[in-house]
Amino acid sequence: MTATTVPPKASMNEVRVRVRVKRLALYTALVSVTGLFLGPFGWLVLSGLKTQGELAASPVHWLPEAFQWHNFADAFTEIDFLGYARNSLIIALLYATLVTLSSAWVGYGFARLDAPGKKWLFGILLGSMMLPQMVTLLPTYLIFAKLGMVDTYWPWVLWGLSAAPYLVFLFRQFFAGMPRELEEAAIVDGCGYSSIFWRIFLPQSWPVLSASFIIAFTWTWGDYIAPQLLLSTDRTTLAVAVMTTYVSEAGTPVPELQAAASVMYVVPILLVFLIAQRGFITGMSTSGLK
């Protein structure tokens, strides 16, 4: 028998020091990255608490001399803030709900059904993700203008019913990893593919449903180009209103009110993510796992 060698006390201390140094380095890196991501939002909050002179000052005033909390109240009352927020909420909820369900349906078809040319169609679908929005902007506007859908919310309904390539990819990867036995047992019991989707696959996909809904909601809530192009001033969204309606009598932008309104504009997205972050992270991490 060989006697076990006990490491000397000095070496054990060295190991503990190395572990602590690695942890300190890791925490420092995480705090630095977090600061990089939160820095713009923190600067936006500070900008909403400054005067117009402090925002235009050179060199830069990092902190306001006196916090101008009234900027937030003024930004809220200067325009119909709740009305524009309601418009954004209606469009975002409408689109997010429809596109999540339609993308789940298309993803189920690509994952579980066999048809000639399915791989080619899926490749074309993924290739459409490479098209920038500007390329399709003018044709899209002309189509909706011909159909009389400008200044209505019908474009977002049609976009929602048409599915989104990235969300289809998420659902396809998730459904492809589900056991084949579930599907075979349902077919034996007399269920069709539609019933299998609604009764078995869709209830099992709540992590991807949550992630897809958050992604689609964020897309629509933060969209500026489509509402600016398709909607009138009364029907437009909060994103457009924040950028275009805070102007002085001379017609120049009022930056402190824009900054304060932008902070209030971002808060709902943060709340949606904080409430549903567990489902979002689970959905993003489980898609594609067998």
Image: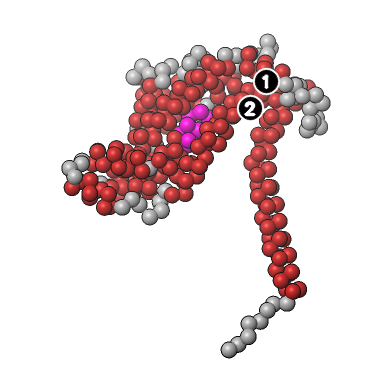
Q: Quadrant of the N terminus?
A: bottom right
Q: Nearer the viewer, residue 154 or 6?
A: 6
Q: Which mark is residue 145?
A: none
Q: How is the image coloured?
A: secondary structure
**Which percent across, then down, holds residue 60?**
79, 32
Assess whether mark 1 and mark 2 are in contact (beta carbons under 8 angstroms): yes
On screen, residue 234 above or below 199: above
Q: Main secondary structure of the magenta part?
A: helix
Quadrant in which residue 163 is drawn: top left
On screen, residue 173 above or below 65: below
Q: Is residue 239 left or right of residue 143?
A: right
Q: Nearer the viewer, residue 247 or 4?
A: 4
Count of picture labels:
2
On screen, residue 186 above or below 22: above
Q: Quadrant of the C terminus?
A: bottom left
Residue at image point 59% right, 26% down = 265
Q: Is residue 248 left or right of residue 211?
A: right
Q: Is residue 161 left or right of residue 56?
A: left
Residue at image point 68% right, 47% down = 31
- How many residues crowd mark 2 within 10 Å: few (<14), some (14–19), many (20+)? some
Residue at image point 34% right, 19% down = 147
Q: Which mark is residue 263?
A: 2
Disc 2 secondary structure class: helix
Residue, disc 1: 72
**Which percent across, then down, holds residue 154?**
38, 21
| Residue range (magenta) | 214-222
- How many residues crowd mark 1 within 10 Å: few (<14), some (14–19), many (20+)? many
Q: Is residue 272 magenta?
A: no
Which circle's residue, 2 or 1, is located before the other in the chain?
1
